Amino acid sequence: MSTLQTTSCADQSAVMAKVRQVEELDNVVIRFVGDSGDGMQLTGNEFSKAVGEAGHDFSTHPDYPSEIRAPTGTLFGVSGYQIQYSSRPVFTSGDAPDVLVIMNPAALKTNLPDLKKGGIIIANTGAFSEGNLAKAEYKSNPLEDGSLAGYQLFKIDIAEFTANALNNSGLSKKDIARCKNYFALGVMLCLYSRPFDKEIEDIRKKFAKKPEFANANVTALTAGYAYAEATELFATTYQMRASAASPGKYRSITGNSAAALGFVAASELSGVPLFIGSYPITPATDILHDLSSLKNYNVTTYQAEDEIAGMCSTIGAAYGGSLGLTTTSGPGMALKTEALGLAVMLELPLVVVNVQRGGPSTGLPTKSEQSDLLQAVYGRNGECPVPVIASYSPSDCFDCAIEAFRIAVKYMTPVILLTDGGIGNAAEPWLIPDVASLPKIEVKFRTAAEGFQPYARDENLARAWVKPGTPGMEHRIGGLEKDFLTGNISHNPLNHQRMCDVRAAKVAGIAKDLPPTKVHGPESGDLLIIGWGSTYGSIFQAREKAAAAGKSVAQVHLRNINPLPADLGEILKRYKKVLVPELNLGQLSKLLRDQYLVPLVQLNKVQGKPFMVADIYDRILELC
Amino acid sequence: MNSPNDIHPLTKKDFESDQDVRWCPGCGDYSVLAQVQKILPTLGIARENFAFISGIGCSSRFPYYMETYGMHSIHGRAPAIATGLKLSRPELSVWVVTGDGDALAIGGNHFIHAMRRNIGLKIILLNNRIYGLTKGQYSPTSEMGKRTKSTPMGSIDRPFSPVALALGAGATFVARSVDSDVKHVASMLERAAAHKGTAFVEILQNCVVFNDDAYGALSNKATRADAGVFLEHGKPLVFGKDRNKGIKLSGWSPELVTLGENAVSEADLVVHDEKAANGGLAFFLSQLENPQFPVPLGVFRDLEEPAYEELNKAMAEGARATKGPGDLGRLLNGGETWTIK
Ligand SMILES: Cc1ncc(C[n+]2csc(CCOP(=O)(O)OP(=O)(O)O)c2C)c(N)n1
Ligand code: SF4
Ligand SMILES: [Mg+2]
């Protein structure tokens, strides 16, 4: 096998092209699965970049256990990365995979039930040892016992081939084993007709400080590619039909990275420094990571001692005249609650991001859910209104991050931005916006001492933002109820009523800024599907499919949840039925019923998994 | 910017807000407020550059009475809020006023981490060894056996010393004073103001209503010379009405001695060194308590270490020097990109 290293891949492809059939595709869903230590997230990531570079739209779904390195070979230690890519726009990472790349028996066991009938399995036979089979609770080897007869099975000893390709590399056995994922990537690039030169460049960049690893991974990659080209195993390779993506410059981006970029953009667009005070928590930490490496921008990052301190430092920074940001997930959100109430009282502009995960309590840290919606809208003591917005896709996190601060500074209020683990970690191609096209965020710090009253309000009911250090305007603010104008402590009953009313009116007033609600599909009809957050893609595809089948169904996807758009109530009335799919037990449903007194049909799922398009499509068919 | 200082020198009056002070008559917090208002005008800092942040408690009402920027926040969180303010606005003089419950019970975590980071906050803890605002429950500094409404049979909680806690958390400046000795309070506040990094001052404060006389021995003219020992850098630990008592090290333990008796002279006594890099001496001192020993008053420790906000600033400058200033267009177009024609 070591000859593979020296064989020129280009020569080989010339030979193979004659004998091998190339099948054209419009869409494929591939899932890479292995032990958490097998590097499947990386393989998936790199593969998605390679297809993005070809102009294809894609959407990914990383799915990993909460153990960093669960004991090898175990069923609970399986880590997966699914990608759907297509010649057409892609909205989800796909329902059932067409292809499973599996690195061990446990991966096969846990993922086979999802594979399409007749789907492709590419299996790393080297990991199908007796021990691993036992750990995966297989009585006999499924690769040999005929139980996979209904699928197209390709057996490759990835471990062995990688080891052979690297036997002269001087690396330890353990390090060699870690190159398996690049061998697998090489196989997949070849099988899906993608070149590997860009990947080699990327490997060299990634391992610039460790050239021996760079060399080994390049060798593994090219060996995998060459193997796939040379072997008679694959009678067919695949070629995605060309995509009609909008022209422009793209990059692959996850929701968390897009949010981080959006927050820096908000700072640049407003000319106000960004301060992030956060405490690490899955799946939100990457926003803190990303911003921490951007200290050359007008960005201060602070890893606080807990989420309360994260929230409080953000209040301190906002008080000092920065855009205050804190990022967290469910349990951390619970800890921030009291201080968030203080921010409401102080009327300071800041943003709290909740990258939701499965709850309650520690729940399902690495799985996605939408179950913190009511917490965001209501979860504080007292009458404590906070604007809530929700991103619907990874790249939408960029826009929402900017939007959140736009609201925060205009209305002098904390804002909650909800995303979720699905959006936060999933990647998709992002058409990079032109900086000049991003509207500026207007911020006025008050410096005129004359006539200053700390709680006097403008036409948006926002009070003035005054930085400590401004002469002649020294004043005190605090969490005790305050006088309507002076901000001094006030226990006056009518003043409290007035303050509660005005805080509520201020947040409700944000609705006047919202654009008319977009309706996909007929303006009126049998069914309206209304969703929010990461379920956008599944709902979109299900609706398209139903519309194609002649159903009268429309979709509204909410980005602003508090306040809701002013035209929503009227839209709801134009349909015979309203379906609300959510990854919770019915939280948006509760809000909508409360606000509009309309009957709704709920579709709820809390399995730590996104909706399948089929979940929603089937429900549509039952309803109309 | 023209600040009031440029026009006329600031006075104590300039730091008094128009709000009525609402502490109980005789509360120890009054004298601390007065001393703070007295020393701030002397620091050469424009009034608008002071910010007072507090939590919740009687003591935490403090900012309302100061004609500076101020925030009365939530219980225990003042150091965390002040940290965000100081980190984003290092040029401000940021003060935290807190109580024994606020700083050490609910806010214990933020308290120790402020000390650990050495961020430039001046933290004044008004320790009355009781929860004043909630009407008299025992606190983390209340002595064992204390009977309060929540401990009718006496407290079984072991108290800790704020000074020892601060030292243990790595504080670079730790001092203690007592509300009744206003001159000493003022001098400790001045020292704290001059310190770079976190400056922690514990002020033993009398709550006339719920824990009166907790520091009676230290405040009473007749007893105070024997109940306390003033720490002075480079000087031996001598105290007492007749200045004939001292503290000697016996093994690792303190020993009370009388000068002139058993041939003990000043040369045998512990000599205070607030600059000692090793925290051993300061911690040793923090263990001295009434009635067995005199309570040390003064600066336990004063070390020159880089402040957190300085390190943070240097880091940002370093990033700008190596990567160049931020450029949004470059940032968005960074990473691995591809172009579709
Ligand atoms: C989250 C929260 N828990 C409890 C309280 C009630 N509370 C207010 S002040 C206080 C104790 C204050 O004691 P201390 O900090 O010693 O201040 P003092 O009143 O003695 O100056 C408590 C328990 C509160 N305001 N907030
Ligand atoms: S209750 Fe005690 S601490 Fe509070 S104001 Fe009265 S005397 Fe002061
Ligand atoms: Mg107290």
Image: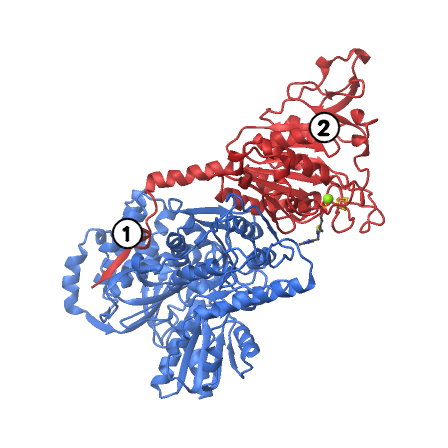
Tell me the subunit letter for badge 1: A
Answer with left or right where residue B171 lies relative to residue A425. right
Q: Which amino acid does label 2 sit on?
A: Pro
SS for callout 2: strand
Q: Where is residue B74 in the image (x, y as percent from the top left)?
A: 63, 52
Mark linked to residue B144: none
Instruction: Identify residue for label 2.
Output: B296
Circle 2 residues within 10 Å: few <14, some 14–19, many ≥20:
many
Q: Colour of chain A?
A: blue
> CB under 8 Å between callouts 1 and 2?
no
Shown in red, the chain is: B
Q: Can residue A150 be seen in this view?
A: yes
Relative to A514, say whether A226 is above or below.
above
Tell me what residue is drawn at x 68 percent, y 36 percent.
B34
Q: Where is residue B181 in the image (x, y as percent from the top left)?
A: 73, 30
Q: Position of residue B29 (x, y in %)?
A: 72, 40
Task: Give the alpha-carbon distance from disc 1 to disc 2, as whole Å.
Answer: 64 Å
Circle 1 residues within 10 Å: few <14, some 14–19, many ≥20:
some
Frontmost residue, A18 versus A540 = A540
Q: In which quarter of the image is ligand 3?
A: top right
Foreground tag (1 vs 2): 2
Instruction: Identify residue for label 1.
Output: A202
Asked whether mark 1 lies closer than 8 Å to ligand 1, one says no
Coloring basis for residues: by chain
Frontmost residue, A203 versus A74 = A203
SS for callout 1: helix
Q: What residue type is labelled 1?
A: Asp
Frontmost residue, A38 versus B5 = B5
Numbered marks: total:
2
Pick the quarter of the image with the C terminus of chain A. Answer: bottom left
Q: Position of residue B93 (x, y in %)?
A: 55, 38
Q: Can residue A255 be seen in this view?
A: no
